[in-house]
Image: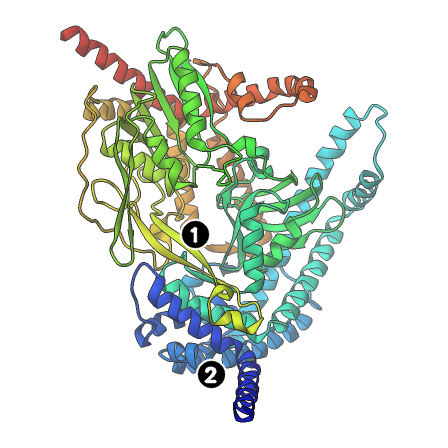
Amino acid sequence: MRIVILFVLVLSLQISESIALLKERKSLLVGNVLKNYLETQHYRPQSVNDDLSSKAFIEFIKKVDGSKQFFYASDVKKLRKYKSLMDDQMVNGNHYLVIEARNIMMTRVKEAQDFRKLMFEKRFNFDLNEELELDPDKKEFVSSEKDFREHWRKIFKQSVLNRYLSLLEEKKSLEKDKKDREENRKGKKLSENKKAQLKIDEKILKMSDTDLRNKAKKSISKKYKNLFSRILKETHDDYLEKFFNSISNIFDPHTSYLPPKKKEDFDIDISGSLEGIGAVLQEDGSFIKVVKIVPGGAAWRQKDLEVDDVILMVAQETGDPVDLVDMRVEDAVRYIRGPKGSIVKLTVRKVDGTRKLIKIERDVVQIGASYAKSSVLSFKDQKARIGYIQLPKFYRDFDGKGRNASSDVRRELLRLKSSNIDAVILDLRNNGGGALVDAKKMAGLFIKNGPVVQVRDRPGKIEVMSDDDPDIIYGGPLFVMINRFSASASEILAGAMQDYKRAIIVGGEHSHGKGTVQAVYNLNNGPFLSLFGETFGALKVTIQKFYRITGTSTQFKGIKSDIVIPDPFDYGKNREQDLDHSLPWDEISPQKYNIWNAFNYKYDLLKKKSGERVLKNDRFKKIIESINYLKERREDTKISLNLKETMRQEKENEEITKRLKITSENDAIMVSNFEQSLKDSESIKASDKEKWDEDFKQRKNEWIKRLRLDPGIEETMHIVMDHLSENKMASVVK
């Protein structure tokens, strides 16, 4: 008995010592678990081996110095000896690449910090004709200290020039605000916060040009001092995160390691528990770029902030702006988030190169704004009535207590049918997806029954999601609008309607092309890591892929429109196929299904008529010219460091943007039956009815204006009218 007890004590002691040792080797544990998850759970089977390591090495260099600002070419060459060893270092815990890359980075940052002190003692000459290349793919790592200093001299100079122009823009905006305030004040009492802001504004208004230049120089010097200090404080774990994600991202761009802090931010993001501007931001080289506007969010309602805008600076209602260039996105959002009702001021650079100051009142996402809404549309002096449904996202409360998209669209269809409509337009533009079950259920509103989508997992098992309800809520002509931001569930619904020939798809040439499903594995839930009482983060990994009932994937290629009309966002490289390491398009066996034969769409004829109209439409001419102009601007990545030339270019860009902006409404579009749809999208208490009634008129006017300003809706209505006309003629012939 004593021997047994002694053995247990010795074993317990050994286990305790082992656990203590393993706690010190946390990165070794995480590396092994990540490798196991990636190799066994990811949809596309790959081994973390030398070949993958070579690809991951390129990603790692990009994550450490993606803008090619710090490393010398000799530094990268020195690190290249680890190119095929990342797989080994992932599991043995000897992260020599991480250690050496961090040490080199610290040395180069200190060099840049020392050079900053010298440069900001001097005066910048903005009369010289110099340029700075912003696209890292078009430049090489520097080869010497001389090149290093010259590159940083231009970076500092461009930053000061950029800040000076932003201050000029702010001063111009303040002068306008002051004029408007004086005209509208009429004895209104100001809050203490507003008084404090006005004092700051007055200081800026009184500044001379020399003052503005000095302020710009001082703030940029401070900005880079703080930036370099922050980089020098980055820990081994920060670089280890880049290491693990360099390997994870090779599997596909949606697979990533979330360390404990990122996991916390991810949970906050999906729960929507923090207030901000309602925009998804992403690092793009040295810049913070807007990649998505959240339906119902503050920016979505304010309307000035757009996808592909670069946020240069952020300021609170009171205080000086903070420069976001070269800032990590997780740091940037801390300045953008804030208390509900407070004002955040963003200085952004538009895609055309113009600079704009945007003021947004922070707020939580108004869920009602993302609910389905409908109206009846018609052309003046035309009898045909067209039901229009806007669906910003496929929402669902999985607790069963709230609303869901498919039930709401069903309700809108029934309402529209009671208004004696002749056809329906379902607008899925900018709909990034959501609940897959609602895409399936929504398809069932328009077909009798049958398969909707196929879902394939890693082992090759295929699940067919079908509509088993024989009821058809709406059986008339259907037209689905998409664009390059229609993704995931939107593509599943649009693809099913296209495959059944149930609807005509109208919009940009292709939808987004995201046809994959991700799962988040909490690493602490595993049987091994849960023993150690530490937080290890999570892995977001792609586990499934969507296929249409024809067998073709929605991944990479997306949905091709039956009738293509100019998409205002067609200038950008922001589709799935533009991402590195995206899973490829492929196909599997098709399902059996019955083509819709209640009526025939004359695709070729409708396409021909639409094309002829588009060429003659002045608003589409503007869109086409704007797309071509922005594509040219996108490729022109060298910027001038000459003040006069920069101001000339900005003025030219502003004039072109103003000329190409669509401002004319089509008054021939009649809009009705909106009030009940809006009421149903919001829970209105009896006590709030008076306030809601006051607000409704403005909301209705905004809704009507948006519809009349949109040439895409106008053209889709014309396509509907062509179809109705052709069907009427066919009926007469029969």
Residue drawn at the location 34% of the way across and 72% of the way down: 48
Q: Rounded to the nearest whole Å, what is the CA distance between mark 2 and mark 1?
A: 43 Å
Q: Residue furthest bottom?
A: 3
Dot 2 lies on which element?
A: loop
| Quarter of the image where the C terminus is located | top left
Rendering coords of residue 485 (x, y %): 41, 41
Place of residue 347 in the rendered image (x, y in percent of width and height, measured from the top left): 62, 46
Q: Which quadrant would the N terminus be assigned to in this image?
A: bottom right
Asked if 696 appears above or below 500 in the picture, the reply is above
Percent across and percent down for residue 98 are 49, 77
Q: Residue furthest left?
A: 734
Tell me if I can see residue 518 in this picture.
Answer: yes
Residue, x 53% and y 84% (percent of image)?
A: 15
Residue 62: percent from left, percent from top: 45, 67
Q: Earlier in the sequence, mark 2 or mark 1?
A: 2
Number of other residues with Cα within 10 Å of mark 2, as a class: few under 14, some 14 to 19, many 20 or more = some
* 134, 161: nearer the viewer: 134
Q: Which residue is mark 2?
A: 94
In the image: residue 725, left or right of residue 103: left
What's the residue at 56%, 92% (across, down)? 2
Is residue 562 something one can see in this rendering? no
The front one of 648 and 718 is: 718
Mark 1 surroundings: few (<14), some (14-19) or many (≥20) residues within 10 A? few
Quadrant of residue 542 within the rendered picture: bottom left
Q: Which residue is mark 1?
A: 636
Give amino acid for label 2: Asn
Q: Which type of secondary structure does the marked residue at label 1 adopt?
A: loop
Of discs 2 and 1, which sits in the foreground? 2
Residue type of the residue flagged with mark 1 = Asp
